[in-house]
Amino acid sequence: METTTEKKQKYGMVIDLDKCNGCGSCAVACAIENNVPPALEKMNKRNGLTWLNISTVSNNEQFPKSESVFVPMFCQQCEKETPCMTVCPQNAVDVDPTTGIVGQVPQRCLGCRYCMTACPYHARYFNWWDPEWTEGMKQQLNPDVAPRMRGVVEKCNFCHGRLHAAKQKAASQGNREIDPADYIPACVESCPNKAITFGDLNDESTLVAQAAKHEHSFRFLSRLGTEPKVYYHSKKQWVRAMAEKSLTRSHQEEFHG
Amino acid sequence: MAKTLTRRDILKFTGGGILGLMFSPLPWKLLDDSSIWTQNWGLTPKLAHGPIAEQFSHCTLCAGGCGIKARTVSGMPYSITGISGHPISYGTVCARGLAGHHMAYHPLRIVHPHMFTGKGSDSAMTAVSLQSALDATAQHIRETRGSIAILDQQPGRAISEIYKEFLSTLPNGIFLSSPSNEDATLLAIQAMVHQQKSSYGFDFENADLILSFGAPLFDYWGTPGRMSALRNAGTPKIIQVDSRYSRTAMQSDEWIAIQPGTEKYLALGVAHLFLTEKLIPVRNLRSAADFAAYGKTVNEFIPEKVSLLTGIDSGRVREIARTLASSQRPIVVSGADPGGGPFDGETEKAIAALNILLGNVGTSGGIVSRFDIPGYKNSSDPIRWSSIPDHSIGVLIVDGADSGYALPWSLVQRKLIPNEGFIVSLAPVLNEISAHADYLIPSPGHLETLQDIPTPTGFPAGTFALSTPLLKKQEGTTDSVDVIRELSVRLNKQLEIPTQEALLKQKSAALFSQKRGSLHIPSDNSILPIRDLSSADDLWTKLTEGAVWIDELLKQTSVKSFTIGLAAVEVPNPKQGTNELPMIAYGWRGATSTAQISPIMSKVFQETELRAVNGTVSVNPTTALQYGLSKEEPADLSTINGTMKVRVKVDPTVRPGVIEASIAPLPNGIETPKHPAGNNILNLCEVTNDGTWRMTTAKFLKV
């Protein structure tokens, strides 16, 4: 019999692709918040560490009818049969039942990269090299997030440092629940176009829950049945249609080979 | 009989041992422990401990002056975000600003005066004393036969006035302003009006239509937060005339793709329709003193001719003119591209003149004049690169502030006296211009010293804010105001130059004495009228705590009298049968090859391809096919300035027959000796006599 009365949340996001202008603020804010290091000279888009990656996807029409959108892609926080969790031999991936957030425990990860293979969204990154910051930048690391060394897989965790800080604040005030205003991931906070809505998908009164149910909202590869908690939104039909294609076979990639 | 040990026994023992080991916990425990150890060993960075706090300040990385909130641990900033409710930046900071606290520890940060000797691969940097750097500068100022210029890329600050005062004591002093050119339309209108000069801004919030000629409105133009707020509000409607499928073209309500370099013909064609179809009130036409000459200029630009020149359907040209004329409060704006630079003067005039014909200068929802900021001298017309004769500058002092817009070294070089031109850079980091200097006297870096923030481009009211230091000033750096004071002493000039803090306190006191406008207080997101403050010290304290002052809006009076000053516009004959293509340069404000960016910006340039790195050119698939270009493959690109190996990106959003060249930081986000400025595609751009480099003729040599 369940004895706890703790409310179960399901944190999720809705990203309005029509508002995203690919400015990159979310990617930079994410890296700073989570102590993701800058690239070494030998790093590139194949071996870089981008918890939040932004792809450009084209409608494959010819000029001047050609259009493109920017698609921020990161851990989609799969709710069911979470592929990375089911394959991890080290229990380094877990899904928090109270928040729905898929977490990654670097101290348990042995770097086998099964989870990277299993992830349908290519949203996990292997840390090939030890991080390098200049001496001064080391003093500027976020004190709430432990830096990872080489040999482990990393990914978005909806800024767990901010969630913990919000929980601490709530506890210090004698509250069981956090104030939603205290828990906003860095990408959401930094987006100049307010393209990302974040919150509890279980709470029907939240903007994110309402936006997720909008007819123009969709999830990538929903046919896999993993129930991702990151939704996308676009009025453009061709954008919604690409959601069921594999990202590596998107229009853009097909075009460029 | 003793049993002998055979090879078979050894194999059996080894095999059994391995099998047994596999069933024991030892290898798994070792694996587990090693994975834990690798995340906890001695080289793992140690995180700072101490009290967490919030501090407010303003960003100085470009002229946008966004409000910033820093989270600090033991006083050291580790995260920067916008300030909610900030009246200038609307809670937003750009990607470069988010990582602004890294700039103090940039790998190319310079914290001691240096002397540069030699050229190219023989060049060397030697640390020198501040005294010897100042002595050498003063000596060159005394002995030069050319002019002495100070290049200020963020004019309008208190230090700008000190520069002007210092230069006024020299026989050939030039205050050279090389700002962003985002305000090109406003400056063109300022030059056209007959009445007393005034500062102008765009009243976008009350407009119902913006016709933008290539202004990167949704890519960090002005203050990025203001434009984002307008976009989210859904008004005004924005029509973007752009030769590229830029981010603004993508986000605007309508994109009109135009042949590069033909923007002025569209502007003249629209003006032609205004006049011939009587789309605008007659009184607006009479406002221009040289209306007859202007009418003659636009006369030949009938829609069919404009269509041929611009590639825009003639019916669409008519539609644009009618849409503009039927709008209640339209604004026509042009602007420089951060990488491609400004339009030529003729184009700026042709575009700005549309505002005059629409009668929106000095009207709400149009181009509005604003009060001068108390304490600041009303600046005279800025001197731009185009006004300076080639090979005329003997000594050039380059202020450390950055406009966020590219500045080709070749443009600077052609203004210097060959083999004599002496450059002193006050930049806090090594960048493309400072790397060519003779001496570098580094100023304190971003967020290391007290600075004032000028009113952002296009803002309808004057503003004043301070960038309060969040970081300790590095020893060996010198405030620009102190450099000028020391130089004036060495040159025996009788100037009383205060310290930076005293200078800014004077400005704050002048603001208080006027009792005009109000303060935004960031800590509680409140507005406080200046008249409610008890003293000038009270205002100063609040400003140093991150408050921003906003002036009252000036009551507008429609401006009726102008001289457009646009002579006959020639249409060049197109070149036939060559394999040359127009190359248009483009960039991203604050992240061109001229400025430095935080290494963490690799998330945008290197580890993703969200923004193309320098040396990348994009072409349409049909162009690629025609010239035998393959995606991601290198090709040799040649212009009048030389040949460079470029990486080709095939992109269907690029106009066929056009090359788009990315002016961006060099690979890995940092300019290092391994990636010298010679590989910079900006150097391939042809700088014309009027100081523009927006379009260059280029051809692919071989693939």
Image (tube, coloured by chain):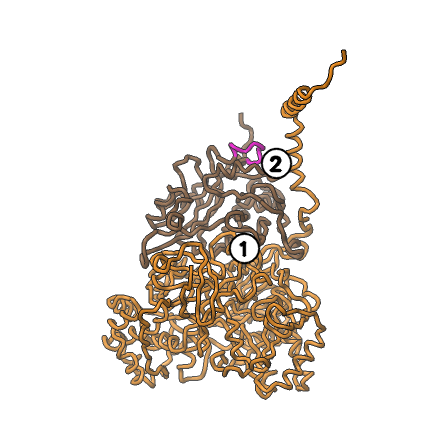
Q: Mark 2 points at which residue?
A: A108
Q: Which residue lies furthest to the top in this view?
A: B1
Q: Quadrant of residue A210?
A: top left
- A88 part of magenta stretch: yes
Q: Mark 1 points at which residue?
A: B602
- Callout 2: residue from which chain? A
Residue A248 visible, this orientation? yes
Q: In this view, does A54 lie above or below B311?
A: above
Please state the horizontal and vertical placement of residue B571, each as a whole percent of the image.
32, 77
- Callout 1: residue from which chain? B
Residue A4 relative to residue B309: left or right: right
Three-letter code for the amino acid on which mark 2 is drawn = Arg
Please state the horizontal and vertical placement of residue B306, each as a whole percent of the image.
28, 72
Q: Which residue is drawn at 64% across and 68% down?
A: B444
Q: Residue at x 54, y 62 (%)?
A: B67
Magenta residues, as a range? A85-93
Spatial CA span between label 1 and label 2: 28 Å
Q: Quadrant of residue B100?
A: bottom right
Q: In this view, does B453 lie above or below B613?
A: below
Foreground pick, B565 / B685: B685
Q: Which chain is orange?
A: B
Residue B479 visible, this orientation? no
Foreground pick, B120 / B444: B120
Q: The brown chain is which one?
A: A
Q: Nearer the viewer, mark 1 or mark 2?
A: 1
